[in-house]
Image (cartoon, rainbow, N blue to C red):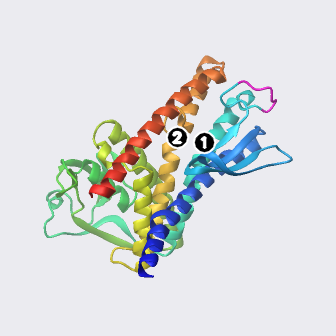
Amino acid sequence: MESFISVLNIALFNIIIPLLILGVFIFVHELGHFLSARLMRAEVKEFAIGMGPKVFSVRSKKYKTVYAIRAIPMGGAVTMAGEDEQSDSENALYKKPVWKRFIILVAGSFMNFILGFVIMAVIVSGAKGFYSMTVSRFDATATSNKMIMEGDTILKVNGKRINIYNDLAYELIREGKDPVNVTVLRNDQKIVLYGVQFPTATDSGMTYGTIDFTTEVENATLPLKIEQTFYQSLSTIDMTWSSFFDMITGKYGVDQISGPVGVTQTIGNSARDVAEGKTGGSATGFLFLIALITMNLGVVNLLPIPALDGGRIVFLLIELVRRKPIKPEYEGYVHLAGFAVLILFMIFITYKDILKLVVG
């Protein structure tokens, strides 16, 4: 009986809950494409969740759209007439104005961002106070106090605007291993402090800067909660963009990327910690992880990579410059090649995730 419960526990937290959550993210993303396509009167041939062979499907009598669930619980698609081929349909996608196609393409990521914003609002709603950017006291091991003073309000780090505490923490992770330039508000004057050194720490071979002071806490009024929801959502999206940029430029290695298996494991572990009341496990932390992943999905799909929404947006920009579209079938060849590369990359990342699980 105990072994059965153990297997059930593993299945619930390692497979069922993560797949359900990822399924919701994918559904919300594809729903954005679907609703905007309907709004722009583009013909939708199929609305699918998952990839591979169909497990279940039904066809709409009015619009002839096929709604399908496919076998592999990864990804999804809203397939439209004239998306990658010539079509006789008067509502083929390529026959729509550029601005309508743009809305359809960005609607998926927009929905992911909206979902992340709503989750962030739930997180923020329960807060009693928020850290401001005004320094109140320094840690015993502080090094930045040689230049920063108590009462200073942090405005920028290396020219990057700091709106909330999360912004400061992330910028020091990215830049803080070396001295940074910090802009502060001191006695109602903006001052740039050059070469501020923060303490550093090393984890998994990466050295990063850490905050060595405490900031004042502001009471969580309704206006401040709205402001924090906006800036925390914006910070999460910006963090994702910056991480991809750092990966492309070689600042972070491929070892620090997680694929579907790694993401599933992270969600499962976080859900289990909350359910079992383990130290470090909290509903707030779990919700923040969920918000982070859905916003990640939104950002990833806007990257200028063939087969992704961002890659299709690039073709729209080319069309604007050329003042005529590229033939849908030619664009389709590019996206097909991009899709093949993405699949190979996902297989590679998945292999690394599984290897981490086996080896540890």
Q: Where in the figure is residue 45, as x and y percent of width and height?
A: 74, 40
Amino acid under disc 2: Leu
In the rendered structure, which segment of residues is drawn in magenta?
86-91
Quarter of the figure with the C terminus: bottom left
Give the residue furthest to the right. Answer: 62
Q: Position of residue 117 (x, y in %)?
A: 54, 59
Could you tell whether 295 is left or right of 101 in the image? left
**Quadrant holding the N terminus:** bottom left
Q: Secondary structure at mark 2?
A: loop
Residue under circle 1? 106
Task: Say if the magenta span includes residue 251.
Answer: no
Residue 90 is inside the magenta segment: yes
The residue lying toward the viewer, choosing from 292 and 145, is 292
Residues at marks 2 and 1, CA–CA distance in whole angstroms: 7 Å
56 relative to 337, above or below? below
Q: Are marks 2 and 1 in contact (CB under 8 Å)?
A: yes
Q: Main secondary structure of the magenta part?
A: loop
Closest to the observer: 137 or 356? 356
The numbered disc on residue 348 is: none
Count of numbered labels shown in the rendering:
2
In the picture, measured across the screen, residue 299 lies left or right of residue 175, that is: right
- Disc 2 crowd rating (10 Å Cα; few below 14, some 14-19, many 20+) is many
Given residues 331 and 60, the one toward you in this image is 60
Residue 219 in sight in this render: no
Residue occupying the point 62% across, 22% down: 319
Residue 74 visible somewhere in the drawing: yes
Q: Which residue is mark 2?
A: 302
